[in-house]
Amino acid sequence: MRELVYYDLGLIDYEKAWDLQRKTFDSRRNKDVPDTLYLLEHPHTYTLGKVADRKNLISSENFLKEKGISVYDIDRGGDITYHGPGQIVGYPILDLTEWKQDTHLYLRSIEEVIILTCRDYGLHAGRIEKLTGVWIEDRKIAAIGIKVSRWITMHGFAFNVNTDLSLFQGIIPCGITDKSVTSLSKELGYDPDMNEVKEKLVNNFKRIFNYDSVLSNQENQLLLRSTGLS
């Protein structure tokens, strides 16, 4: 039976969440924990992936200081992106040997989870050929950047829900100059409930990755403490 453990971590500092990912990654590799999905929000943060061009960080030091934005160079794929309140960030720590050993399919499946969630709100989201992420026409609503090592995954997706899109002005998102960014609230014309969006994401994640069950909040908090990940 395939089981997923889901944690809603709320607002959490990027570095703390990154450390939690690494601990969970090691625990998953050692088969001490089942597949795990963290959903959370970060304070204002720019992250640069392994192949990022630092020229795409166009913010001045004054802008970064004024907005309280932290900057991290990290070990995921992709270029530069923004994280902040109102954006649901998902970090799946999965063992792909228990699903499908196909990194390309994994990326497309993460996209499909978000596409289905947008569809739940009546929005037609999709893909753009040769570009990773989820789009509504030429507007990017979700960025994806992952790391896969020995078929264990980390990092994941950033889904703009009620996000302050003005903070993307300090970067060239993903190094793409001819596309814009959007959010669920901008497309809908109202702010959807974050907990409702998370519930839809988890349900679609369960469906796309063929899980039989998802642990409840009470159970997963106990597991977090018992495994020393908290």
Image (spheres, grey):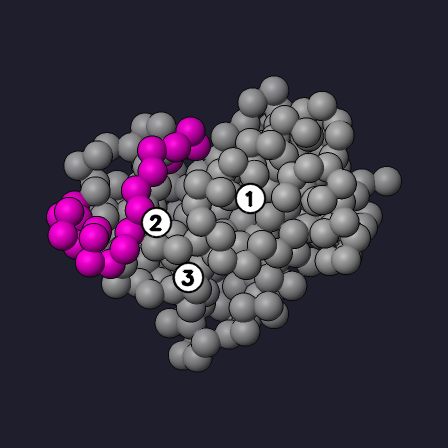
Residue type for callout 1 = Tyr
The span shown in magenta is 58-78
Quadrant assignment, res 225: top right
Q: Are marks 2 and 1 in contact (CB under 8 Å)?
A: no
In the image, is residue 145 part of the stretch drawn in magenta?
Answer: no
Q: Which residue is mark 1?
A: 91
Q: How many marks?
A: 3
Q: Secondary structure at mark 2?
A: strand
Cα distance, mark 3 to mark 1?
A: 16 Å
In the image, is residue 75 part of the stretch drawn in magenta?
Answer: yes
Between tags 3 and 1, which lies in front? 3
Residue type for callout 3 = Pro
Q: Which residue is mark 2?
A: 45
Q: Is residue 106 visible?
A: no
Crowding around mark 1 (Cα neighbors within 10 Å: few <14, some 14 to 19, many 20+) is: many
Residue type for callout 2 = Thr
Q: Which residue is mark 3?
A: 85
Give how far across and how far down residue 186 sits, in percent.
37, 72
Q: Residue at x 60, y 62 (%)?
A: 198
Give the answer, above or below, for where 169 lies relative to 96: below
Q: Is residue 157 visible?
A: yes
Give the answer, above or below, for where 85 lies relative to 29: below
Q: Secondary structure at mark 1?
A: strand
Give the answer, above or below, for where 150 lies relative to 222: above
